[in-house]
Amino acid sequence: MSLRAAHSPEELLLEEVLCETGSFREIVLHNDDVNTFDHVIDSLVEICDHDPIQAEQCAWIVHHNGKCSVKRGTFDQLEARCHALQQRGLSAVIQ
C-alpha cells in the first residue's frame, strides 16, 4: 500500500477557487449491467489513482445509487481519464 501526500495549503486553495469559479468539474461513473466489480475497481485504481479501498467504495456507491463522482478537477485534468474509463467500457461523463 502506498501513502499519499496530504494536499498543500496552495492546492487546497486552488481547489476552493476552482469550485467557486465553476471551472471545477467531476467525472461521474454510472451503473451498468455489464462490468464486474473487479473491472470497475481495477479501472479506478489504474486510471483515477484511487487506492483499492476507495475504488471498492465507489463501486458500491455506483451499484446502490446508480452513480458516483470518482474524480474532481478541471476539464483539462479530467478529459483523458474520462476517455480512458470509457475505453474500458465504463459509463463515465464529465459534469
Image (spheres, grey):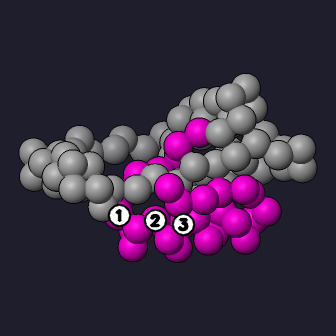
**Closest to the observer, 37 or 26:** 26
**Sequence-wise first label, 3 or 1:** 1
SS for dot 3: helix
**Closest to the observer, 12 or 51:** 12
Whole-number angstrom distance, CA of label 3 to CA of label 1 = 12 Å
Which residue matches tag 1? 74
Percent across and percent down for residue 88 are: 75, 65
What label sits on residue 81 in the rendered view? 3
Q: Label 2 amino acid?
A: Leu
In the image, is 13 to the left or to the right of 1? left
What label sits on residue 78 in the rendered view? 2
In the image, is 50 to the left or to the right of 36? left
Residue shown at 73% from the left, 71% from the top: 87
* Mark in front: 3 vs 1: 1
SS for dot 1: loop
SS for dot 2: helix
- Regarding residue 49, the answer to whether it shows in the image is no
Residue 94 located within the stretch drawn in magenta: yes
- Regarding residue 68, the answer to whether it shows in the image is yes
Residue shown at 65% from the left, 39% from the top: 67
**Magenta residues, start to end:** 68-95
Q: Are marks 2 and 1 in contact (CB under 8 Å)?
A: yes
Q: From this viewpoint, which residue is outermost toward the right? A: 34
Q: Are marks 3 and 2 in contact (CB under 8 Å)?
A: yes
In the image, is 90 to the left or to the right of 36? left
Whole-number angstrom distance, CA of label 3 to CA of label 2 = 5 Å
Q: Label 3 amino acid?
A: Arg
Q: Label 1 amino acid?
A: Thr
> For the residue carrying disc 1, how many other residues have a C-alpha within 10 Å: few (<14), some (14-19), or many (20+)?
some
Percent across and percent down for residue 35 are: 84, 49
